[in-house]
Image (cartoon, grey):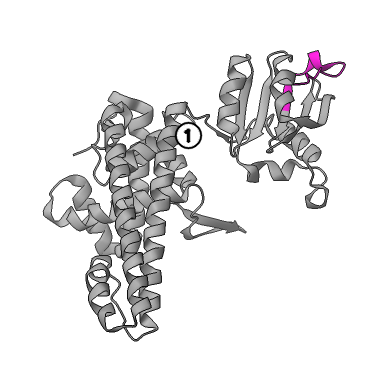
């Protein structure tokens, strides 16, 4: 039988709540308008959490952006609360006990403190459709990684028998079966199994690619993003689902910085030095934009638009690798403009 939970005395004065999310037992820390703790529950079971929060007055509820956070945030909106998600690395400095005092209760208090900071950066709460799209992307990406790992395993095993296959995937598939004919029987069986697994993964990836294309065609934001050079259905749908309308970023450079496409900066004594790109943020989105930039640069010589001319000039000045990153960063800024400004944005041709 489900046991309900009643708020502690003074819980009706709660204005801000911090929740340390977990699988089964949650920690809840609430403060009133003066910042005084008035709701401290270090052990709240999952089946009791919503009952507790539903009895509170409308308040700001802070959580770390992790598994299940977006679903819980959407549920809390129905109760009249204002959920705000934060990256865990931004919460850590607000734990007063430091690294040695890490526990669920202290983490909840740190989240409660961090969510009140005026300059805190929040993660936008994703819609159900956005999470569905990102789920398709995540599974597809896993299949791609598994296919790459399988091919590399095949090359490594055959090299043990003196058969060194080239790096090109299509060549490996074609030559592996022929080269295995002179190898022991069980090695031939292994090669056939691995090639068969690769074929199955190819089919799965093609199915997910088709699904992503359908999502892109049905989504207005994705269709607008695909008008940009170097952004196809996969990149467009991933950006639209992850960034939303882009209003959580002040400008395009902030989005590029969030994706780790801007150089790291170190300044001291009035001297500022720029280093390599930070590679912070979403690795998947960054890799998609970089691959799109490579495609754009490879086709730039056959085009005469302003972006292609700029890309060719940039490559001649800074080299291929830096030019690719710069193009990816530029596409990130253009993508923000498309998402944030909509029809008002007119790219230069």
Which residue corresponds to mark 1?
Answer: 249
- 145 relative to 30 in the view: left or right: left
Which residue appears at 34% of the width and 82% of the height? 184
Residue occupying the far bottom of the picture: 162
- 209 relative to 131 in the view: left or right: left
Magenta-colored segment: predominant secondary structure? loop
Q: Quadrant of the C terminus?
A: top left
Which residue appears at 23% of the width and 52% of the height? 296
- 7 is within the stretch colored magenta: yes
Foreground of the two, 90 or 208: 208
Residue 45 quadrant: top right
Range of the magenta residues?
A: 1-17
Task: Please state the horizontal and vertical placement of residue 217, each as a whole percent of the image.
Answer: 25, 31
Foreground of the two, 183 or 213: 183
Foreground of the two, 334 or 25: 25
Which residue appears at 49% of the width and 30% of the height? 126
Decide: is 171 above or below 179: above
Residue occupying the far front of the picture: 185
Foreground of the two, 135 or 244: 135
Task: Please state the horizontal and vertical placement of residue 205, each as a whole percent of the image.
Answer: 32, 49
Label 1 residue SS: loop
Task: Please state the horizontal and vertical placement of residue 290, each as a whole percent of the image.
Answer: 35, 53
Q: In which quarter of the image is the N terminus?
A: top right
- 75 is within the stretch colored magenta: no
- 183 relative to 264 in the view: left or right: left
- 27 relative to 240 in the view: left or right: right
């Amino acid at each position: 039988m489900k046991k309900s939970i009643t708020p502690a005395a003074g819980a009706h004065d709660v204005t801000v709540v911090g929740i340390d999310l977990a699988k089964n037992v949650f920690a809840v820390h609430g403060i009133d308008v003066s910042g005084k703790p008035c709701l401290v529950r270090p052990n709240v079971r999952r089946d009791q959490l919503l009952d507790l929060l539903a009895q509170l007055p409308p308040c700001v509820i802070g959580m770390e952006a992790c598994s299940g956070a977006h679903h819980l945030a959407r549920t809390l909106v129905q109760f009249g609360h204002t959920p705000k998600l934060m990256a865990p690395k931004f919460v850590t400095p607000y734990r007063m006990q430091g690294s040695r005092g890490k526990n669920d209760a202290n983490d909840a208090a740190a989240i409660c403190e961090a969510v009140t900071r005026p300059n805190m950066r929040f993660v936008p709460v994703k819609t159900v459709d956005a999470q569905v799209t990102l789920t398709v992307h995540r599974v597809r990406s896993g299949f791609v990684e598994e296919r790459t790992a399988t091919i590399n395993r095949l090359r490594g095993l055959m090299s043990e028998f003196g058969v060194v296959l080239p790096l090109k995937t299509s060549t490996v598939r074609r030559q592996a079966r022929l080269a295995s004919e002179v190898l022991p029987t069980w090695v031939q069986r292994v090669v056939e199994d691995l090639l068969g697994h690769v074929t199955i993964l190819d089919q799965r990836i093609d199915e997910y690619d088709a699904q992503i294309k359908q999502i892109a065609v049905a989504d207005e934001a994705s269709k607008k993003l695909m008008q940009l050079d170097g952004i196809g259905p996969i990149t467009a749908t991933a950006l639209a689902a992850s960034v939303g309308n882009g209003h959580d970023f002040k400008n395009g450079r902030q989005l590029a910085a969030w994706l780790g496409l801007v150089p790291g900066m170190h300044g001291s004594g009035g001297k500022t030095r720029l280093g390599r790109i930070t590679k912070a943020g979403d690795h998947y989105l960054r890799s998609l934009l970089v691959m799109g930039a490579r495609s754009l640069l490879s086709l730039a010589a056959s085009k005469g638009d302003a972006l292609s001319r700029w890309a060719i000039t940039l490559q001649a000045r800074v080299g291929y690798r830096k030019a690719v990153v710069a193009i990816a960063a530029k596409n990130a800024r253009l993508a923000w403009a498309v998402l944030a400004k909509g029809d008002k944005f007119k790219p230069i041709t």
